[in-house]
Image: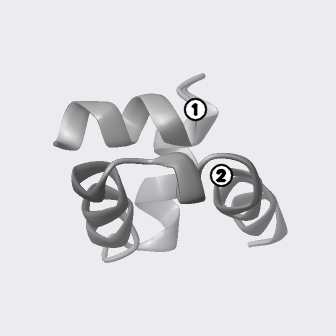
Amino acid sequence: MKELEIWLNAYLNNDYTEATVAEQSAFSQLLDHEDDYLFDLLMSGLSVKSVISTQK
């Protein structure tokens, strides 16, 4: 999904390098989910950064 790729790449380009190890790990775990789940999650209005902060 192109939209999903845009959201995830935006996080990688803007926030990943400054994220804590726990946040980087949570991002990695987030990628284990199916695309449809991630798309629905992000379409609900949450940002990648906010989703990751709830997974730590």
* 32 versus 22 height, above or below: below
Q: Which mark is residue 14?
A: none
Question: How packed is label 1: few (under 14 Cα within 10 Å), some, or many (20 or more)?
Answer: some
Determine the CA span between mark 1 and mark 2: 9 Å
Residue at figure coordinates x 39%, y 36% from the top left: 51
Q: Mark 1 points at which residue?
A: 47
* 25 versus 54 height, above or below: below
Q: How many marks?
A: 2
Mark 2 element type: helix
Give amino acid for label 1. Answer: Ser
Tell me if label 1 and label 2 are in contact, CB under 8 Å.
yes
Q: Using residue 49 as the reference point, say whether residue 3 is left or right of it.
A: right
Mark 1 element type: loop
Q: Name the residue under label 2.
A: 11
Foreground label between 1 and 2: 2
The picture places residue 52, in percent across and down from the top left corner, at: 35, 42
Residue at figure coordinates x 74%, y 68% from the top left: 5
| Sequence-earlier tag: 1 or 2 | 2
Q: Which colour scheme is used?
A: one colour
Where residue 33 sits, quadrant-wise, is bottom left
Residue nearest the viewer, comparing 50 with 2: 50
The picture places residue 16, in percent across and down from the top left corner, at: 55, 56
The picture places residue 25, in percent across and down from the top left corner, at: 26, 65
Give amino acid for label 2. Answer: Tyr
Query: Seen from this angle, which residue lies furthest left?
Result: 56
Quadrant of the frame with the N terminus: bottom right
Residue at figure coordinates x 44%, y 28% from the top left: 50
Quadrant of the frame with the C terminus: top left
